[in-house]
Amino acid sequence: MWSFPKSWQQLQLPKITVLLLLLSLLGVAAAPSYFSGQWRWANPPKNQAFKQLRHLQKTELALPGWTTTQRQVVPIGGHQWLVQEIQSQSLTVPGNLSKSQPTRAVLLLTGPRGDTKQPEVEWMDINGFQRWNTDSVRLSKFTVSAENLVTDTTQEANSLKQLPIQVKARYLRGWTQQQTFAVLQWYAWPAGGSPVPSDWFWADRKAQLQSDRQPWVAVCLLIPIEPLGEIESVWPVAQSLAQTVQSALIKGPLTVPLK
Amino acid sequence: MLIRRKVPIAIERYALNGAILSLLALLYAPLLWHWVDGWLNKSISTEHEYFSHGLIGLPFAAYIAWNQRHQWRRLPEVNHPLGLALLGLGAAFYLSGLSDLVNLSLPAILAGLCLWLKGMPSLKLQGFPLLLVFLATPTDLPYLIAPYTLPLQQFIAAIAGFILNQFGMDVTVEQIYLYVGDRIVEVAPYCAGLKMLFTSLYVGMMLVYWTGTWTSRTKTSLFFLGTVVISVSANILRNTILTFFHGTGQEKAFEWLHAGWGGDLYSACMLGLTVFLLTAIDQYFSGSPEPNSADSAAE
């Protein structure tokens, strides 16, 4: 053992602390990257779903209780949107004259074209495409129970089962001279949903800390209602459809390889 | 005895300083290269490209810090605990491996080094270069503030539409969309001119420091006000020209000004205009006695 003179110690100990700290950073984080040539900060963590979401518009989302009558791909604001016209016999929109008439809705979906693409101004794009008037905008909330989403019985999946997935969405009325819609819009990701891009951003960055991502899909639901009719009476239908869509997305393109 | 000890201390000190600097270089050279390469070749994300003013800001910061090395050496060796906290934070950020956090670890570690080795006075000394580094550190902040630029986008769309109407073009403006015939031009969040505004304010900051104008509050406020006006109007004009090109089907010209080197040239001209503005302000005030200096003379 040997000791420094006191003055020397006072002078240099802080520097030695710094030296050791930087040295450990080099050893733990930088040196392995120098050898592999792969820097973690250069690319976000990989998630297979991003790759398959690029082909989302070539597919069709299967929704239990709903049948697809028509599907097409429409370019809206620089994105390719999958536009799926659907109908259901079991749900009825209040005000429908005959109970036997099926409930119709239009589902618009688009996903990221690469794993660095983030949600941006999709709702504004839709406004520009529809050229409609919007009003009665409110933030709505619904939950999707995670129980029927998890198919495997691993420990991790079991702990996930407990928490219902919270989703926030924009509920509004969009109308033109020809048609009035109840509109519900949100970005769906495996752990939740929100119409606000920054909500997705923080959820995704939280996942990145655990070397994962939150792939996303922009969802816009249109439910035709009577001209300038109020949208609150349609809410139960919108909510039920939204829950179906969120679960279908989580069970489908957001996690499982597309067929 | 005393003499004999001095020599190893000097050597040890230089060796330690050298070791710390080399370690910093080893830790951050690939990252800085990634930034510079990304800014020059536009291979970095759109958000991180907002910080391309670092191309001039970072060397300038290094130059200032180097010029102050004698003052730095004269500072007393006091250790501020906040420095250690910042170093720890920086280390945690570095280890996270996430792009934004690793980037932010650089200013955190640099500020931590100052505080830990030389205390508060060093932060005062190196404050400006540290600020330059911090403001050139790429983060996703532009993505997070993009939703709040909507009023600016609407304003730009309205003015651009108005100007083009004056020239006899048939343009309809709705929200942030300009409809020219069957074509639609969207004033996207990234067209709101925040990048141009950030760059001109950053370069303005460097100019004000370089010329010593910052000692006069009147001149500085006038200059920054002028810079904001120049930057915002230049961007409106740019969007107008872009709409004109797109609306009249001149795709090549549109691409050139939108994403090609035409956009860079346009920004460079605008920055040149701010230099001109600063010279003009300086000349105007050197002609008439300046209120601030008059105040200090009275004291």
Image (cartoon, coloured by chain):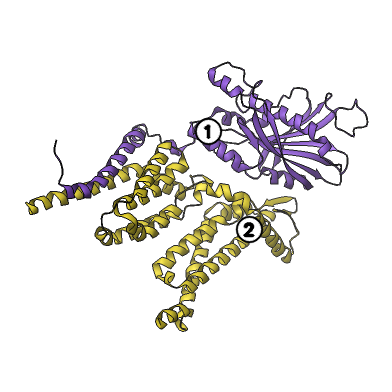
Q: In the image, is residue B193 above or below residue B223?
A: above
Q: How many marks overall?
A: 2
Drawing shade for chain B:
yellow
Quarter the N terminus of chain A occupies:
top left
The residues tagged by marks 1 and 2 sit, at their Cα atoms, a distance apart of 37 Å
User: What's the colour of chain A in the image?
Assistant: purple
Q: Residues within 10 Å of mark 1 (few under 14, many from 20)?
A: some
Mark 2 is surrounded, within 10 Å at the Cα level, by few (under 14), some (14 to 19) or many (20 or more) other residues, namely: many
The quarter of the picture where residue A148 lies is top right
Residue B271 rendering spot, x and y as whole percentages = 50, 64
Residue in the foreground of this view, choosing between B20 and A162: A162
Q: Amino acid at mark 2?
A: Asn
Q: Give the image location of residue B150, x and y in percent.
A: 65, 53
Residue placed furthest toward the left: B1
What kind of element bears circle 2? helix
The location of residue B272, given as percent across then percent down, is 49, 66
Q: Which residue is mark 1?
A: A207
Residue plotted at (74% across, 46% down):
A127
Where does the C terminus of chain A fall, quadrant-wise?
A: top right
Q: Which mark is residue A142?
A: none
Q: Identify the residue position indicated by label 2 in the image.
A: B239
